[in-house]
Image (tube, helix red, strand yellow):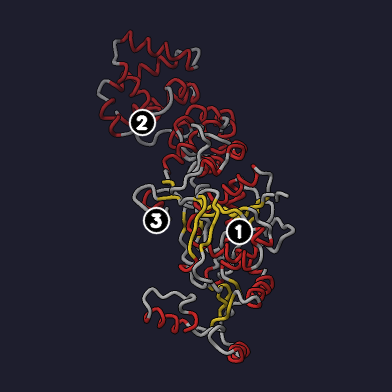
Amino acid sequence: MERKVRVRFAPSPTGPLHIGGVRTALYNYLFARQHGGDMILRIEDTDSQRFVPGAEDYINEALAWLGIGIDEGVREGGNYGPYKQSERRDIYRDHVRMLLDAGKAYIAFDTPAELEAARAATPNFQYDASTRMSMRNSLSMPADEVKALIDGGEKYVVRFKIEPGRDVEVNDLLRGKVTINSSILDDKVLYKSADDLPTYHLANIVDDHLMEVTHVIRGEEWLPSAPLHVLLYEAFGWADTMPSFVHLPLLLKPDGKGKLSKRDGDRLGFPVFPLEWHDPKSGEISSGYRERGYLPQAVVNFLALLGWNPGDDTEIMSMDELIEKFSFDHCSRSGAKFDFEKGKWFNHKYLQEMSDEELAQMYKPVLKEHGVDPSAWTDEYITRVVGLVKGRINFVGDLWDQSKFFFVEPEEYEEKSVRKRWNAEMPAIMGELIEVLKGLEDFSSKAAEPVVLGWIADKGYHLGNVMNAFRLTVVGECKGPHMFDITELLGCDETVRRIQLGIDRLG
């Protein structure tokens, strides 16, 4: 009987969620939803020394913002909990005992100093079948001595006993069959008595099995640990329920070589975290995609195509479309360069698809940030402003730079345009223009444009100089949407007032 698809995203609460981790969560979610399966969020907090307050809440908030739905987790509950590893100590202890009783693991008392001495004495030292009998562990020591040390409170670890000389096969849905000889594997630590917690390797396997995970989809950095995980499944007698593995390619630097890091974002000016992060220890603030003005659907679309394609040239896809099209058959095995400029393009595209009314509501907080009270303007006015300039923006915040002149008069005039377009004759010409505009019965763009252009032609004035000087006085610089669309929205009185103000200031 085919099992129901169950995947898990298992981050550690050691800081903000990296954008590479977000992509891993997204691929898990797409695969689960496509197959009618479950998405589990498991918090792997066994590394107590690296725990960062607020990180778990950050992970939940980030996934919720992106629309990556969770079926089971700390917040959602479920039938396979607890979903936080620090709350599963009893479960791990039982499974450590199972391995010890079966002779698949052993207790080791080696101190950090003793391990360091072994590394110094033996080039490329590895704790394995060739060295374990020369170390202090339950395989090399009498049983009564081992018991006495444990009873006396001696700190110890439990190591997995790797048998050498065996080819271990990992079946990866993306990379095919990967074979690694067990002789190159060391006897990994599975449990530490010092904090009564398992290491990642044991907790990961036990939880995946007990939570009935069918597919482990994670970054390629975990590929070297996959043979160990196969051996652990076999040691517990769970080979028949071993999940399928998928090791995703890395997200690479936009330039140069290597894995994408926060330093790359700081250097090139883009976020590497989904949400803004306030480090509780250092106080450092790291930017996030949400706070930079990215739409969550644009971020999802952008990330989905970093290492995967739908098999055709389609680029803009909703979450539902991504779910329908997603397949590991079209995933790349090599790393994907993080093209942050393409991310801006996606955000631009999604903003253009939004209605002017919806975008106008999003613009209101931006107006407040710049000292403009949105309630002083009608929704219709703000919506029409947005409609005139939205084609020029990549982010909602860009609306201010493109449209501020609709809300505040120019306080200064672009120097380059003044030098190029304003001369001794221009004040008089602008004075004439005022009279032409005042004489218009219809101030709409469609009606005003032919009258003004006709006046310029009749007077023999230079069209470019006059229209740019006109724009300079009203806008403050020679940019913006169609000039007569601007004046229609501002109205005759405000347009005339600004032209006169420009004449007075520029002389």
Q: What element carries label 1?
A: helix
Q: Tell me whether the residue at label 2 lies in contact with that at label 1, contact meaning CB atoms closer than 8 angstroms.
A: no
Decide if residue 118 is on the left or right side of residue 240.
left
State the CA–CA distance, disc 1 to disc 3: 24 Å
Number of numbered discs overlaid on the protein picture: 3
- Which three-letter amino acid code belongs to the residue tagged 1? Asp
Using the image, determine if residue 13 lies above or below residue 154: above
What's the residue at 57%, 81% (across, down)?
107
| SS class, disc 2 | loop
Which numbered disc, 2 or 1, marks the residue closer to the eye?
1
Residue labelled with disc 2: 477
Question: How far across and how far down the image is residue 153, in percent?
Answer: 60, 88
Marked residue nearer the N-terminal end (3 or 2)? 3
Nearer-N-terminus badge (1/3): 1
- The one of 133 and 31 positioned closer to us in this rendering: 133
In depth, the one of 410 and 380 nearer the eye is 380
Residue labelled with disc 3? 263
- Residue 371 visible somewhere in the drawing: no
Question: CA–CA distance between discs 2 and 1?
Answer: 46 Å
Residue 79 appears in the picture as rendered: yes
Q: Position of residue 167 (x, y in %)?
A: 51, 62
